Amino acid sequence: MSQVWSVSGSANVLGSHIAGAVPASSGRLGAKARVGRADLFRHRQRGVHAASATATAALQDTPTVFVLDDDVSVRESLELLIGFEGWRPEVFASAQEFLARPRSFTPSCLVLDVSLPDINGLGVQKLVADRVDMPIIFVTGYIDIPTTVRAMKAGAVEFLTKPFDEEALLGAIRQAIRLSEAALREEAEARALRDRYASLTTRERQVMALVAAGLLNKQVGFRLGISEITVKAHRGRVMQKMRADTLVDLVKTTERLRLAPASNP
């Protein structure tokens, strides 16, 4: 049976207990009680490793799960659950507070409440629409079909109604993290491709464009007013710099350069 951790008070990590942390027997957010630290760890059976010299470096690569919800009990519950799963939780009570945070370039996702005191969830989704590396999981206290449809059409990974099942949320987070990792890889590859293209000389770029368009070396030379031997030399350097083994590779690279979006600062 799955459980969601419910928190009725702040977690006391230095004392002999964690205040208010208890597994809800229904598997949903809601139950509140006080249990001992040993009981908590025995029930979850998910170890928390001691800090080490390499912990800081490892933490930088740990996926971050942002939680934006004005309900303190939800924030505390999800912060505990996310931490036990091995992700790094960051919780926010308002949209402005979250939006002021600098962009993270590690895998991440956002668990976002629909109803917020300053900007509603759909408004936040619109403001971070360019953050394809941060998929959104919506949570809400009530079912609203039009809002759900709008959120999903705008790219939300999941739309969960409170009280939600722990495994449903964790499954959505895992999916969102995988999507984030893929987006970051694609962005890194596109950035590396642009860097390689930037290393080409003006003449090499001209040769690359014409060769990728299907022109023969002789035709490229005629178009640029240079000898065929010179074209071959430029073409060889282009292939090397762009890491293209074949003409097909070069054509694909050219197409990717046209499609690759500029990275955010």
Image (cartoon, rainbow, N blue to C red):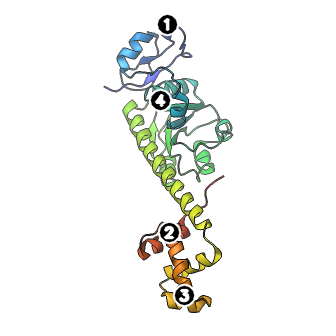
Three-letter amino acid code at disc 3?
A: Val
Marker disc for residue 82? 4
* Disc 1: which residue: 16
Q: Amino acid at mark 4?
A: Ile
Q: Quadrant of the N terminus?
A: top left
Amino acid type for the residue under numbered disc 1:
Ser
Name the residue tied to disc 2. 240
The circle drawn on residue 85 is: none
Q: Which of label 2 and label 3 is nearer to you?
A: 2
Judging by the rendered image, the residue that carries numbered circle 3 is 220
> Which residue is located at x 53 percent, y 88 percent?
228
Where residue 78 appears, as percent x and y from the top left, is: 49, 28
In the displayed structure, does residue 167 sit left or right of residue 8?
left
Residue at (52% x, 36% y) in the render: 65
Q: Residue at x 61, y 88 (%)?
A: 224
Q: Secondary structure at mark 2?
A: helix
**Mark 1 and mark 3: span between their CA atoms?**
77 Å
Q: CA distance from mark 1 to mark 4?
A: 21 Å
Give coordinates of residue 92: x percent, y percent: 61, 32
Q: Is residue 119 above or below residue 43?
A: below
Whether the residues at callouts 2 and 1 have beta carbons within 8 Å, the answer is no
